[in-house]
Amino acid sequence: MSKNKKTVLILLVVVVLIAAIPLFALKGAEFGGSDDAGSQMIEEIQGDYEPWFTPILETALNGEIPGEIESLIFCIQTGIGVGVIAFLMGRFVERKKWTESEE
Amino acid sequence: MEYAAGLSGFFVRVCRRKMHLFGAIREKEDKNMTKKQKILIKATIAFAVMFAVCPSVNAMHIMEGYLPVGFCIAWGVICLPFLATGFISLKKRISENRRSITLVAMAGAFIFVISSLKIPSVTGSCSHMTGTGLGAILFGPAAVSVLGIIVLLFQAILLAHGGLTTLGANTFSMAIAGPLLSYGIYKLCEKAKMNRKASVFLAACLGDLFTYCVTSIQLALAYPSETGGVAASSVKFLGVFAPTQVPLAVIEGILTVLIVIALESYAKPELKAIGFVKEAK
């Protein structure tokens, strides 16, 4: 099991490094979305392109979703996911402890 | 909003149903933390650090209104049979064994989390991962298409991320093509008797990359370049997406391996029930 633990730790460190290094290596980079890069590419190929449909929430709001609100909604998404995972993992961990102590 | 409410309702219901299966579990042992619990805590901390990294918004799906109507409809129609089989297979699996609901919820939640994390990449732009590899490995590609479309709907309606008109195309790339490849690779590795962790990593990582390749090709089909046609155009789009995505694909592979390790150590009965872990030891 300690072998497992080691793998888990090493993998986590690798993940964090991969995610963090670009941030420090490319100081001043914009870190915009690659979606935007995609739209620019379309414009490059097609000339001016006018999207023929705007996202419904933007239509309802008559403009772009405010940045803070957008991050709020992203957080909600993450929160739902993490909540479910944490809840289920919690149950699994408890169950395992419980069944082991039965034996 | 409706969708979000319905969705969280779905998860709550799923969880509630599970409750009485484990109902007998009480806080029997509450002594020292086991090694694994410590690992879990460390894992959550690492996750938290990752969340904090990139607040900038926007990422990969095809943007709302950026595909011509014909393509939207065509991709949507292509998705339908997958969604139908996915729905049926999920239903069948759950009626066969109610325990597998937990794993379905887990796979869905994993997609939720992973696809909401925008991570900076070497090219100086942010992108996020798909998280569909786990579901594909556990339940097969069809089932994932259902889970994936839930996430895509959430993002399209609430976040103006991806879009309703491009839903078909995005579903095809993220929830069908990627998982299909993941599943195939995983099965191949299984045949070749490769180490499970390695094959999970390969499957998730390449599935993620493949999603972006498909997105590029979808865009290229809609916007063939004047000089080189579809091929030249897809190379161009790949040039935008691929370098950003490679490190993220690696991260996705690693995270999938981590959650598989976690499930293997704590959820053996469920994994056996869905035939992921063969009866051994």
Image (cartoon, coloured by chain):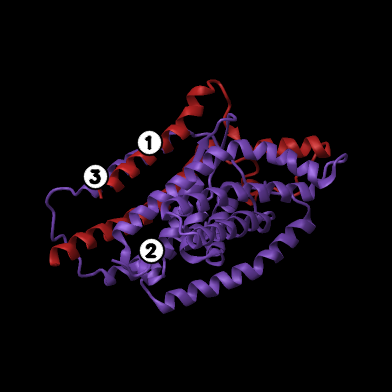
Q: What residue is at 48 percent from the left and 47 percent from the top? A: B253
Give the distance between the C-alpha atoms of the residues marked 3 and 2, in whole angstroms: 27 Å
User: What label sits on residue A13 in the rendered view?
Assistant: 1
Residue type at the position of mark 2? Val
Residue lying at the far top of the rendered structure: A27
Report which residue position mark 3 lands on: B38
Q: Along the polypeptide, which appears first: circle 3 or circle 2?
A: 2
User: What label sits on residue B12 in the rendered view?
Assistant: 2
Give the distance between the C-alpha atoms of the residues marked 2 and 1, in whole angstroms: 33 Å
Give the distance between the C-alpha atoms of the residues marked 1 and 3, in whole angstroms: 15 Å
Q: What residue is at 82 percent from the left and 40 percent from the top? A: A46
**From the viewer's perspective, is A76 left or right of B175?**
left
Neighbour tally class for label 2: few under 14, some 14-19, many 20 plus, Cα within 10 Å: some
**Which chain's residue wears label 2?**
B
Q: Are marks 2 and 1 in contact (CB under 8 Å)?
A: no
| Residue B49 falls in image quadrant | top left
Q: Chain B, which colour?
A: purple
Give the position of the C terminus of chain B as an image quadrant: bottom left
Position of residue A26 relative to residue B149, above or below, is above
Q: Nearer the viewer, mark 3 or mark 2?
A: 3
Is residue B123 something that shows in the picture?
A: yes
In the image, which lettered chain appears red?
A
**From the viewer's perspective, is B89 left or right of A90?**
right
Viewer-side residue, B191 vs B116: B191
Neighbour tally class for label 3: few under 14, some 14-19, many 20 plus, Cα within 10 Å: few
Residue type at the position of mark 3? Lys
Position of residue B132 relative to residue B127, above or below, is below
Q: What residue is at 52 percent from the left and 40 percent from the top? A: B248
Is residue A69 something that shows in the picture?
A: no
Residue lying at the far right of the rendered structure: B227
Viewer-side residue, B8 vs B125: B125
Neighbour tally class for label 1: few under 14, some 14-19, many 20 plus, Cα within 10 Å: some
